[in-house]
Image: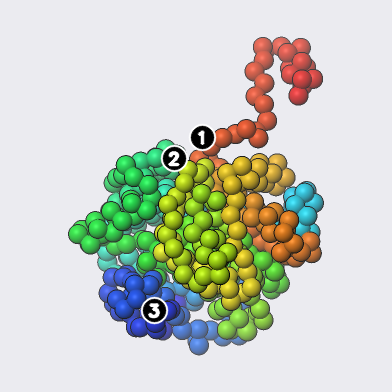
Amino acid sequence: MGIVRRLACPRCAGPGDLSGPPVVCDRCGCVMEIEMDLGHVSSGLAEEIRRRPRGLWRWREFLPVESPAAVLTLGEGDTPLVRSGRLSRQVGIERLYVKNDTVLPTGSLKDRSVTVAVSRAREVKADTVAVSSTGNHAASVAAYAAAAGLGCVVMVPAATSPSKIVQARIHGATVIAVEAAFDATAALFREALRRFGWYSCLSSNPWRNEGKKSYAFEIWEQLEGEVPDWMIHPIAGGLGVSACWKGWRELRELGWTARIPRMAAAQSAAAAPIVSAWEKGQREVEPVEVGETIAESIAAGAPALGWRCLSAIAETGGAAASATDEEILAARSLLARTTGVFCEPSAAASLAVAMTLRARGIIKPTDLVVCVATGHGLKQPEAPMAQAGPLHTVAPTLTAVDNALTRS
């Protein structure tokens, strides 16, 4: 299992309390980070990991849970890395891969973080876990809490896709739908957290955040040690980029890789505070008011880890770009028709931004690019389907079928 060296603020280096609840730095308000002790990792561990049963926890030496009995898994991790010549040709990137997280247990990337968060909750004997969410995180926490036998409270904006809300409800969570946008919902949740003392599964929980390092580990193995030139991630709070960056840094620390990919953040044009800061040359993110967007899973105006995401982009020579709803929906359709991967709109932001960066000449035709598809299309089935093929309703005769085929 993993050995935690220390908990500290990545900005001011102030120490944290490993035995206390997950809280932000009391000096500067930043999300704390865990530093793993990798000194005990042997040179032969990589080969041993390859022989272990598939799943995220075969990388357990890199994860901050020390008790094997506390681990709660639903089989997350080791999602496919999909390469399609048809997609590559249409986008103009010869080596374009899609990391398909739509097939995770609850249908989204959140399972990577939540398996670690709930395992840690069990380790510290918590009885109720809780989160505020745009939907996917709520569904994941509810599912893992149900499997662990823990109580669960989730808060979501009332406008959240019903498909995501029903996931949390069917798992037995107490679901509170707030008549407000996500940022206001999150603020209310933080007040409730202080009052009721639930175990937080927010991105302010540094144990939880370590789970998304697994992107780096899996992709490193799937590409047989080759490092992508670019990794592009749909971003709301900033964790997808910053945690993946941390995973690659740990691999480099061990000497398993010599370099780190250029990290790129993909946001909706209606909710792009990280992109705005990047374009202005800033290293701090200013909150923005979120506009109406189909990309509800990344519709956050005040990213908790925005500055850390900007650090990852800057230090790797990466980029940040946004996409309109029209560009996101077009990318989702292209992904479905060329790779067979059906994702929710937010998840297609990575491909939409890859196309933008390619058009700008920032990504070269020969670059090895990995786009993360973060959530399944059935998470938001009511999203516009203008790009979907027509539905042919016919009489039960072969002639009618022939006519329909002729028309199509």
- Residue assigned mark 1: 382
Quarter of the image with the C terminus is top right
* Location of residue 159 (image quadrant): top left
Residue 356, image x, y percentages: 68, 55
- Reply above or below: 195 against 255: above
In this figure, which residue is indicated by the disc labeled 3?
Answer: 9
Crowd rating for badge 3 (residues with CA inside 10 Å; few <14, some 14–19, many 20+): many
Mark found first going from the N terminus, 2 or 3:
3
Distance from disc 1 to disc 3, alpha carbons, whole Å, reads: 41 Å
Q: Residue furthest front?
A: 280
Q: Which residue is mark 2?
A: 161
Which is nearer the N-term, disc 1 or disc 2?
2
The residue at 75%/52% (across/down) is 91
Against 395, residue 119 (above or below) is below
Marks 2 and 1: in contact by CB < 8 Å? Answer: yes
Q: Is residue 316 above or below residue 208?
A: below
Say what secondary structure mark 3 lies in: loop
Q: Quadrant of the N terminus?
A: bottom left
Dividing the picture into quarters, in which one does residue 27 lie? bottom left
Image coordinates of residue 192 in percent, x first then y, are 24, 56
Q: Residues within 10 Å of mark 1 (few under 14, many from 20)?
A: few
Q: Looking at numbered disc 2 in the image, what kind of residue is underneath it?
A: Ser
